[in-house]
Image (cartoon, rainbow, N blue to C red):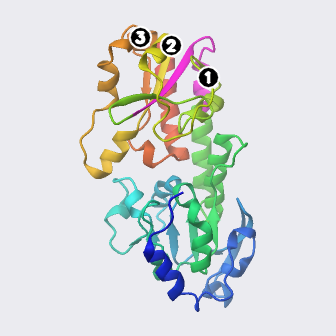
Amino acid sequence: MHRPNVRLTAVIASTAALALGLTACGSGDAGGASAEAASGESETVTIEANGGSVDVPSPAQSVVALDNRTFKLLDDWGVELSGGAVSLMRADLSYKDDESILDIGSHREPNLENIVAAEPDLIISGQRFAQYDADIADLAEAPIVNLDPREGEDFGDELKRQVTTLGEVFDKQDEAQALVDDYDAAVERVSAAYDADETVMSVITSGGDINYAAPTAGRTLGPVYDSLGLTPSLEVDDASSGDQGDDISVEAIADSNPDWILVMDRDAGVSANSGEEYTPAQDLIADSAALQNVTAVEEENIVYMPEYTYLDESLQTYTEFYESVADAMEQGN
């Protein structure tokens, strides 16, 4: 696991005196409440996060957001940030151009001292930054809320839990419920349109390669099989959850002859922020001689996840994707 750079070591030392008495707040201890909350100037709301009950200020006055799944949600809800993982945010969010937001950097090069500088009374962690929760708790007085999908739980339900819980935090319960309803409606549309006799292949394109994304276990597309009740065309042992999928030959993918192919273009999400040139997934599939006789390709039964999916694996992204899947399957029927 990548550890923070030397700046983190320095800031831990320099803030040790200020950090006396601080505790990690994911355990349900309200000791991380802000000064305003402690003095009675702000109310609190108790929510259930991954570590248990957490008391968070309502309304929060200074929010740091680190979880990729939450950025668009918070932006849509008009939540102002004092700090965030700006470099990990999709380019179409208003936060990207807001110079008042202290950039916490990426999970590979975290700038955790900027969390201290932001003086947050609420930190929304998770996904790429979850590995640093203990370090952050040692530095910051604010409660840390982690709502990552929990292993062993239904993935769709976990995404909905994240949205509805944040709806409680930011007094956006109606808006959160509307997003949940939209998601459920999209799932129902796919369920009604999908023929379980038709098999499905999911792939991740990255670095010019077409890689296999395993049912259930595979990154991003794996949970789709369980959420939608899809029948895989190919299952392999020891499949990974890596962000680039598994290096299985395109010929093996073709031999499974799927009726449908679902695609996440990893490079599209990266390029949208960096401007780097890449070969789109559509071109990779069109140029693959091995795939041209596959049923899904011949019948154009290929559905691509939204461009920013690699950076935004949120409830809204899956809703948009499932609507596209439903559109394609309804048209095929």
Res 299 label: 3
Q: Is residue 188 magenta?
A: yes
* SS state under label 3: loop
Residue 294 higher or lower than 244, as above or below:
above
In magenta, the rendered stretch is 187-205
Residue at the image position 43 percent from the left and 10 percent from the top: 294
Left-right relation of 104 to 223: left
Camera-nearest residue between 117 and 238:
238
SS under mark 1: loop
The location of residue 214, given as percent across then percent down, is 57, 29
Three-letter amino acid code of the residue under disc 2: Asp
Q: Which picture quadrant has residue 225?
A: top right
Asked if residue 175 shows in the view, the reply is: yes
Q: Residue 237 lies in magenta, yes or no? A: no
Q: Earlier in the sequence, mark 2 or mark 3?
A: 2
- Under mark 3, the amino acid is Glu
Identify the residue position indicated by label 1 in the image: 230
